[in-house]
Amino acid sequence: MVMQIKWQELSFVRPPPAFFEEKEYRPRVGRARSEQTEQQYFERAIRKLDFLRSNLGIDPAYGLEEITPDDIFNWLDGARSNLRCSSWNLYRACFCNLIERAIFQQDQKHNDFADEKGANEIEAALNAMGATWIKLRNLKWSDATSNLGRTAAERSKEFPKKTSSGKKKNVSPEVLFRLELYMRNSGSEWQHRSLKLCWATLYTGLRLCEWDDATIKDDGETMTLIVSATNARGCSRELKITKGEARDAVREQIQSVSTWKEHVRSGTTSSDFQKVYVSQCASALRIAQRQIFGESQGITPFSFRDQFAANLKTAGFSKEDIATTMGKTFINADGQDSTNGSARRKMSVRRELAMAAEMPADYADSVQKIFVSVAH
């Protein structure tokens, strides 16, 4: 019996470990993932099922339930020859989680099945799914014929390079002016939010996710931007903002985030900052580029962090000072990143260095000249 599974109706909630104790198939014991990670795995697997349906030639009118666990196994088996090891392992983990949920939820749905024959058929189908799940767990990227005796790095060189070359690493004053002119006059709320995020990032160099918890201390003469660490490679820091334009940009961005969070607390939208706030701003910026230039120029909100680094370099700051200001780990004399405990302790000591986030004169003057020339 082949059981049809309504994949899109499954919940991403992980089955309790006790469920598998009396089964022939058991989940691999590993570190527990957060609920957010579990949901991301689930959503990625569902998206990949759409691709798999097209790959198998299944009519979209039939939905995803025409796809079986064996179809998933066969695709992953063949994909070892044309996917990098890291990508393939991610897809395998996502699909293993998805099938694990399917087994659990199908079992819960049919455990009160009145007809003994039907219940036995359901149990046989679940055992078959469990057997496929075990095969999938035991499938290894390195065992594929194309990968035998070769490392993941060696195979990776045979694939197209994974780069961000399609994204702009900096933003010219001319492009910035055109974006400012269009987005400030746009009636879109997210156009306005995106513009504030871009300007504030240009003045401070913050990672996009760091705006989630950033706060300001303003004594009337000097504004201090307080940034919390977001990951192991980042660090908490304080930036003194002295110029009026920079202070206004930072204040507007902090207010924009605060207003959005109040909106979130009212229960009207999702609360994930990176997934909602940042992605919406990025989308608004992309739309603005298409409206202005006819197509995207590859500029993202992160491009303004790159431009901030370029501005500091132009202004003559050292690599260590730039790294400190941007919240990176300590960079040694050879220019290499160091992430050991000693380096982080050094970074903690350097945290007292509060540098002013300012654009160098040539970039700032270029932007100002464009605005003045248009105003006249």
Image (tube, helix red, strand yellow):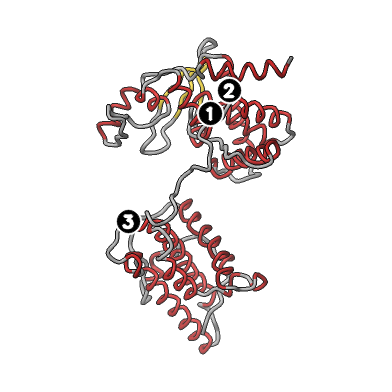
Q: Mark 2 = which residue?
A: 251
Residue 135 placement: quadrant:
bottom left
Q: Quadrant of the C terminus?
A: top right
- Closest to the camera, between mark 2 and mark 3, is 3
Count neighbours of disc 1 (C-alpha within 10 A) and say few if under 14, some if 14 to 19, many if 20 or more: many
- The residue lying furthest to the left in this view is 342
The earlier-in-sequence mark between 1 and 3 is: 3
Which element carries disc 3, helix, strand or loop? helix
Q: Position of residue 346 (x, y in %)?
A: 28, 26
Q: Mark 1 = which residue?
A: 201
The structure residue drawn at horizontal position 51% and vertical position 22%, both measured from the top left corner, is 216
Amino acid type of the residue that numbered disc 3 sits on in the rendered structure: Glu
Which element carries disc 2, helix, strand or loop? helix
Please state which of residues 225 and 233 is positioned toward the viewer in this rendering.
Answer: 233
Which element carries disc 1, helix, strand or loop? helix
Amino acid type of the residue that numbered disc 1 sits on in the rendered structure: Thr
Q: Is residue 211 left or right of residue 28?
A: right
Q: Are marks 2 and 1 in contact (CB under 8 Å)?
A: no
Vertical arrangement, residue 170 with respect to residue 42, above or below = above
Q: Position of residue 111 (x, y in %)?
A: 50, 77
* Cα–Cα span, label 2 and label 3: 49 Å
- The residue lying furthest to the bottom in this view is 117
Q: Mark 3 = which residue?
A: 154
Residue 22 placement: quadrant:
bottom left
- Closest to the camera, between mark 2 and mark 1, is 1
Vertical arrangement, residue 194 with respect to residue 354, above or below = below
The structure residue drawn at horizontal position 53% and vertical position 34%, both measured from the top left corner, is 303
